[in-house]
Image (tube, rainbow, N blue to C red):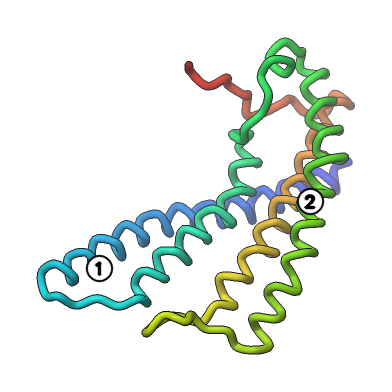
Amino acid sequence: MNALLRLARAIDTMNDRLGTVANAMVLAACLVCAANAAMRYAFDLSSNAWLEIQWYLFAGIVMLGASQTLRLNEHVRVDIVYMHLGERGKAWLDLLGTVFFLIPSMLAIAWLAWPFLLQSWDVQEASTNAGGLIRWPVKLLLPAGFVLVALQGVAEVIKRMAVLRGEERLAPRYERPVQ
């Protein structure tokens, strides 16, 4: 179990770092948006590339930040059952949901996104907009992001198994959103 917990911590660390990158992308998107608006209104200069960079940054925020959201236990869940369970019940629900739903669905979507990326790479797809960007880098985020969520799911399964064996405690605690 110690080797598995080390693997889970390594996955946590990787997704924590990618979460930091996603956070930086939020700032970058804001700066690009502000600079683009300023250039457009002050100097009547604009480029479709600046708009597309914003879209690419938004895609990076979502696809690189999703695994970190799972790691921090801040994803959307159905509270009606979960909030009434004890620690072991929550661990079992998380474990079963992750094994039977999260990991298979993330890997299936990553698998289905792969040809989408390869086709874009093969033809060196570029935006049809004047001054637009190449498309394969943003399409790479699709399979990569879903694989990252699946990997984080593996880490969560390992941690829930450790909880069920009494070797770990559930952390961070899930808090029901204020309504």
Residue 87 pos. (x, y %):
76, 17
- Spot occupied by residue 29 in the image (x, y as percentages of width and height): 37, 60
Identify the secondary structure beneath mark 1. Answer: helix
Task: Residue at the far front: name it.
Answer: 128
In the rendered image, which residue does mark 2 sit on? 7
- Residue at (18, 70) in percent of width and height: 40
Q: Residues within 10 Å of mark 1 (few under 14, many from 20)?
A: many
Query: As shown in the figure, which amino acid type bears the numbered disc 1?
Result: Asn
Outermost residue to the bottom: 123
Please identify the quarter of the rendering in which residue 41 is found.
Answer: bottom left
Residue at 58 percent across and 21 percent down: it is: 175
Which three-letter amino acid code belongs to the residue tagged 2?
A: Leu
Quickly name the residue at label 1: 36
Which of 22 and 54 lies nearest the eye of the viewer? 54
Q: Residue furthest top?
A: 84
Give the mark nearest the N terminus, 2 or 1.
2
